[in-house]
Image (cartoon, helix red, strand yellow):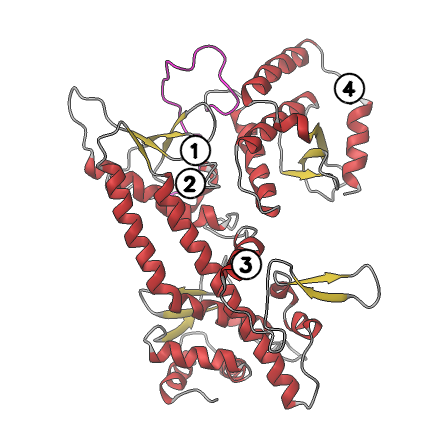
Amino acid sequence: MPLTKEAQAVVDAFGTQPGVTAQQLQNLKNTIDGSPALTQEVNDAVAQGHLQRIVPLTNPHAGGEYSPTAKEMRLPPAMLNTPAGGTYNSGEATFVLGHELQHGFNAAATAQARTTFGQEAAAVAQSPAHQHDYTAPIGKLIAANRRDEAGAEISGWNAIVTAAQKDATDHGRAAPTLEDIYKKQPFRMGDFIDVDRSHVPPTYSMKPNLEVDPTTLHMAASAKNLEGMGQNYYDRAGGLGHNGNSSYDNYYGAAYVGAVAQYERAYNPPQPGQPGHEMRVDMGRLHLSPDIVAQNGINLGANTNPMPYVDNSTGTPVHAQFRHTATSHTYQPLVPLPDAAQPGVPRLDQYSHPDHGLYRQTLDAVHRLDAQHGRHSDVSSDNLAAAVTVQARRDGMSGIDHVVLSEDKSKAFGVQGDLHSPTKQIAEVNTAQAVSTSVEQSSQQWQQAMQGRAAQAPPLDQQQQQSQQAARQM
């Protein structure tokens, strides 16, 4: 099936964009022609008005973009280069085109999700209740983004599959196997196909949380596949955002926390002599890091003063502030508000705690671990982060870059430095004990540990040496 006249005109116009070479344009045409599913998508997108132009991409932290407002596809021209002395590999462009085009078809559902978000956020803002909790509206919109991205990944898969099938037919070969499809673009296909390299030759199988038509290998956008790709791609993806260090949740969440702050202020201007409402956001439930969302850019609107909110991720509410970082993209430690309900020594999960920074760094690592294992973060995540924080301080560590589990999950390791570095530092805790130790208990242990370290700086003991040796074998 060839491109329609209208679709061909959109593709040809890419060649007139600044910096686009004749070679890049030809490779784009060959990529589309080489995948029947992709050709159909381009034709449908142009016919339905989703795709009006293709332009060069300037965002260094994205492999491709689709703008529903401009109705344009943005591609990095370098992706369409033919290497010197080599041949052009269409795998990446095929997948990216299939992925980004699907965002256009999903745009109506995504727009409806945004409309619902606005309605629900406005309802929260106008509630007579003292506490205005925006966690649910933000969570629903993030879930819609997750479905959108998962569906786009499925579209990329189908584009690759039909490209492999057409290539086999054109060259008189047998229908492609999962191995053939994997090799079209291993980086992308690794989210769909498991490769067992424990023997020779390796074997290839679909990931257990996905299903395809056994004859055509077509993947439907079923509930199972959408959830599967949510786990395999959305929950694990990194390298996004302004600084290229963000997950999808934090990438989208930065805009949403700024939006709810604007709703709260718009509907609740200060009233002299009257207490204001309490804005609440469960950052842990939403998998949001105050640091990363700030780096991605929080837009508080016309009023750029810090917005007070309560993070109710833990049993004890933590008072904090969102800062306007839409232009600075710089994280500043959030300032805790006075809280008469928090007497004495603060807990690790309170911003006033002197080691809250290490706890939050550890909690972010635990949240990444949760995502890798397909579980939602909860109070057990908070407890594990607190226990690892305390053990790290006992062991003289100053940071936690990763939290990983032993093969049997009986031990958790907090790692400072690169996982594969021989100089990394490791703090080991018993997983079961850690998740059953409350943040408050760990906070008391932290105080005792710091008092002990102040009295005497102990050498690295044999237990830590053993845990380092065990973790290096992971």
Rendered-image quadrant of the C terminus: top right
The first of marks 4 and 3 along the sequence is: 3
The answer to whether residue 342 is magenta is yes
Question: Can I make out residue 63 in this image?
Answer: yes
What's under tag 4, amino acid-wise?
A: Pro
Image location (x, y in percent) of residue 367 = 56, 39
The first of marks 1 and 4 along the sequence is: 1
Helix, strand or loop status at disc 4 = loop
| Residue that badge 4 annotates | 459
Q: Nearer the viewer, mark 4 or mark 3?
A: 3
Image location (x, y in percent) of residue 326 = 35, 45
| Residue that badge 2 annotates | 294
Using the rendered view, name the quadrant where residue 135 is placed. top left
Question: Can I make out residue 388 in this image?
Answer: no
- The circle on residue 229 is 3
Q: Check contact, mark 1 vs mark 2: CB within 8 A.
A: yes
Q: Mark 1 to mark 2: distance in Å?
A: 8 Å
User: What residue is rendered at 69% in x and 39% in y?
Assistant: 405
Q: Check contact, mark 3 vs mark 2: CB within 8 A.
A: no
Helix, strand or loop status at disc 1 = loop
Judging depth in this view, the residue of 460 and 279 nearest the camera is 279
Judging depth in this view, the residue of 69 and 136 nearest the camera is 136
The answer to whether residue 210 is magenta is no
Packing grade of label 2 (10 A; few <14, some 14-19, many >=20) is many
- The circle on residue 346 is none
What's under tag 2, amino acid-wise?
A: Ala
Q: Nearer the viewer, mark 3 or mark 2?
A: 3
| Residue that badge 1 annotates | 332
User: What residue is rendered at 16% in x and 26% in y?
Assistant: 271
Image location (x, y in percent) of residue 376 = 53, 41
Q: Which residues are magenta?
A: 327-350
